[in-house]
Amino acid sequence: MPARSLLDVDDLSPAELVAVLDRAVAFREVLPPRDLLAGVPVLNLFFEASTRTATSFTLAEQRVGADVISFAPGASSLGKGETIADTALTLYGIGVRVIVVRHQQSGFARRLADAFEGHVINAGDGTHAHPTQALLDLMTLRQEFNRFDGLRVAIVGDILHSRVARSNIVGMRAMGIDVTLVGPPTLLPREFGAGGVRIERDFDAVLPHVDAVMMLRIQRERITGGLLASLDDYTLRYQLNRARLRSLGGSAMILHPGPYNRGVELTDDVLDDPRSRYVAQVHNGVFVRMAVLDLLVNGVPVAA
Ligand code: NCD
């Protein structure tokens, strides 16, 4: 049987997803001994820029006792024409057992997993998926509300280019969360409104009725042509700012996967607002990644 990988959130059953979150919470309360992955070689292979995710994975790997290898793939032989399959064979032969991969191409993590005999964790592939981000967002939501079922969450902004949004939609729907996507037609095409997900163009109409709002960055590096006609018009309609904070419920929470662009999707007021959970999100990320490593390599008992 091939080793288990995490390419998107739905590689976990709902029961496993909850088990991973429970495990992550337990790790947050008391750090486990550094031996869960003692001596397991884990390779961080980031082809695309990352601050949070790369740091968080590295710390998580160290906390479970893995042998952590990080290298700049810019200098790798993939650039010399070696195929993914040959690279995978080489890495496994050297002894690597887990690869954490980020790549600008959607589907890259799957292609690597198909060729690699060890475990692959997708740390973001193109616009496709970013499962550990969705898991840490779910962990942060549950920490606040103690439940998922019936929670109302709005994800706002550049949904089209967001692997974070895609993975969150999968995870949130699996947990019974009511998801509304908010954005202009260019950044939020109708096709996203499937599987019980609502599409809204009017942010102000949604804001008073949600338990959580997740603001997304405009991914300028992935935008080609005239998808965003006017940034002024965008901020007018979709920026979370002081005025809009007033219509958000007092016990609602604000999420952002980072990196945020102050003055675009949010203003300084948002980050200073007590409802903002950005720091809790990045904090939870380390424990979720420890739990994912543990699940893939050791298996996690799931209650029947
Ligand atoms: C995001 C990503 O890289 O997918 N950030 C993250 O991992 N927390 C979102 C983004 O780039 O806007």
Image: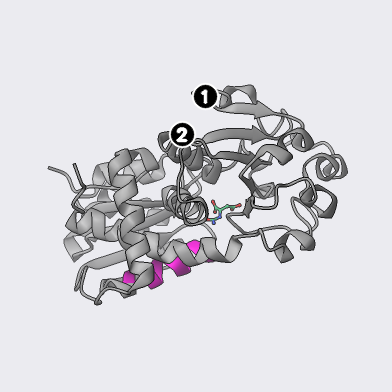
- For residue 98, side relative to residue 255 (left or right): left
Residue type of the residue flagged with mark 1: Gly
- Res. 83 visible in picture: no
Q: Is residue 110 above or below residue 260?
A: above
Q: Nearer the viewer, residue 81 or 105?
A: 105
Q: Can residue 5 be seen in this view?
A: yes
- Which residue carries the number 2 mark? 173
Quadrant, the N terminus: top left
Q: In the orientation shown, which residue stands out farthest toward the left?
A: 1
Q: Which of 225 and 298 is in front in this view?
A: 298
Element at label 2:
helix
Are the two marked residues, 2 and 1, in contact with CB atoms closer than 8 angstroms? yes
Q: In which quarter of the image is the C terminus?
A: top left
Residues drawn in magenta: 50-61
Mark 2: is the Cβ under 8 angstroms from ligand 1? no
Toward the bottom, the furthest residue is: 33
Residue linked to disc 1: 196
- The three-letter amino acid code for the residue at tag 2 is Arg
Instruction: Classify 206 as above or below 24.
Output: above
Identify the residue at horizontal 74%, vertical 32% (top origin).
184
Classify 85 as above or below 44. above
Residue at screen point 42% across, 55% down? 79
Q: Which residue is drawn at 45% across and 54% down?
A: 139
Q: Earlier in the sequence, mark 2 or mark 1?
A: 2
Q: Is residue 83 left or right of residue 243?
A: left
Instruction: List x then y, in percent, for residue 274.
Output: 68, 63
> Residue at image x 19%, y 54%?
299
Query: Secondary structure of the magenta portion, mostly?
Result: helix
Residue 188, given in percent of the width and then of the height, sits at 66, 31
